[in-house]
Amino acid sequence: MKFISVAIDGPVGAGKSTAARECAKRLGFVYCDTGALYRAVGLYCVRNGLDPKDPSEAAGCMGKIKVDISLVDGVQHVFLNGEDVSEDIRLPEISMAASAVSAVAEVRKALLGIQREIAENNNVVMDGRDIGTVVLPNADVKIFLTAKPEIRAERRYSELKKKGVDTTFEEVLSDLNERDYNDSHRAEAPLKQADDAVLADTSGLDFEQSVELICGIVEERRNVL
Ligand code: DC
């Protein structure tokens, strides 16, 4: 059986995970947030005093860790050596560690199979940085989701505030710019729009409008598949 795959890539805070999750729900597809895998590796480094920026330390830890994702009541959970780390991976310092380890070829290689396997066995909406370019180059629908940096930072800032994280808008904006720079300038699978991806800008859109935009692109493409 051929499953349908929707690849959504884009920079930090473009609304990928929230909009993609809702879009997957409406389509009846599985949602896969691939950033969570890199976050789990980043978390392992931080917890074990390894430097995520040191490629040999990040690569070396891959032999010691097992990262899995599974759905619990339709929601993706991430497991690091059997422990559910879905909450712990969301802290800002883990975002930066995830970005650092994601530049390491051995880390990317180790996580590639998990992502492809999900798409081989499910209708999926998968989001990340290299889904349309590397993970699923033959995805049925590819979307590059973006928005102006200040707008993305504002969204991320209010998300973190709601969770009680002590930060400022300026700090969030500066972290976001640093992470986007790292993610799009690395040698391995850098963040970039696939040639055949549809560009979707959510700058002026609220959550519902962003979901409608993505679902609309998917439906339009599905009609010609
Ligand atoms: O989507 P996110 O913010 O949770 O991702 C965390 C980091 O993981 C991001 O800064 C870069 C990396 N990442 C990646 O390199 N490739 C992906 N497909 C997903 C995330």
Image: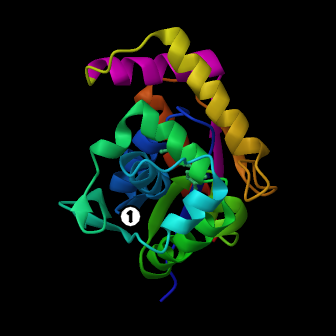
Q: In this orientation, which residue lies closer to the viewer: 136 or 46?
A: 46
The x, y position of residue 184, in whole percent, is 74, 43
For the view shown, which residue lies furthest in the bottom direction?
A: 1
Tell me which residue sits at (31%, 21%) in the image: 165
Numbered range of the magenta stretch: 143-162
Quadrant into which the C terminus falls: bottom right
Q: In this orientation, which residue lies closer to the viewer: 22 or 181?
A: 181
Q: Is residue 122 above or below residue 11?
A: below
Q: Is residue 30 above or below residue 2?
A: above
Tell me which residue sits at (63%, 51%) in the image: 54
Q: Is residue 12 above or below residue 2?
A: above
Q: Main secondary structure of the magenta part?
A: helix
Q: Is residue 147 above or below residue 89?
A: above
Q: Based on the displayed image, in which of its 4 quarters is residue 133 positioned?
A: bottom right
Q: Amino acid at mark 1?
A: Phe
Q: Based on the displayed image, in which of its 4 quarters is residue 58 positioned?
A: bottom right
Tell me which residue sits at (26%, 25%) in the image: 163
Q: Residues within 10 Å of mark 1 (few under 14, many from 20)?
A: many
The x, y position of residue 118, in whole percent, is 44, 74
Magenta-drawn stretch contains 6 = no
Q: Secondary structure at mark 1?
A: loop
210 lies left or right of 10: left
What scheme was used to colour the molecule?
A: rainbow
Do we see residue 217 in this rendering? no
The x, y position of residue 128, in whole percent, is 56, 52
The x, y position of residue 191, in whole percent, is 71, 48
Residue with the mark numbered 1:
29
Question: For the image shown, how many numbered marks are present on the structure?
Answer: 1
219 lies left or right of 84: right
For the view shown, which residue lies furthest in the front direction?
A: 49
Q: Based on the displayed image, in which of its 4 quarters is residue 10 positioned?
A: top right
Do we see residue 39 in this rendering? yes
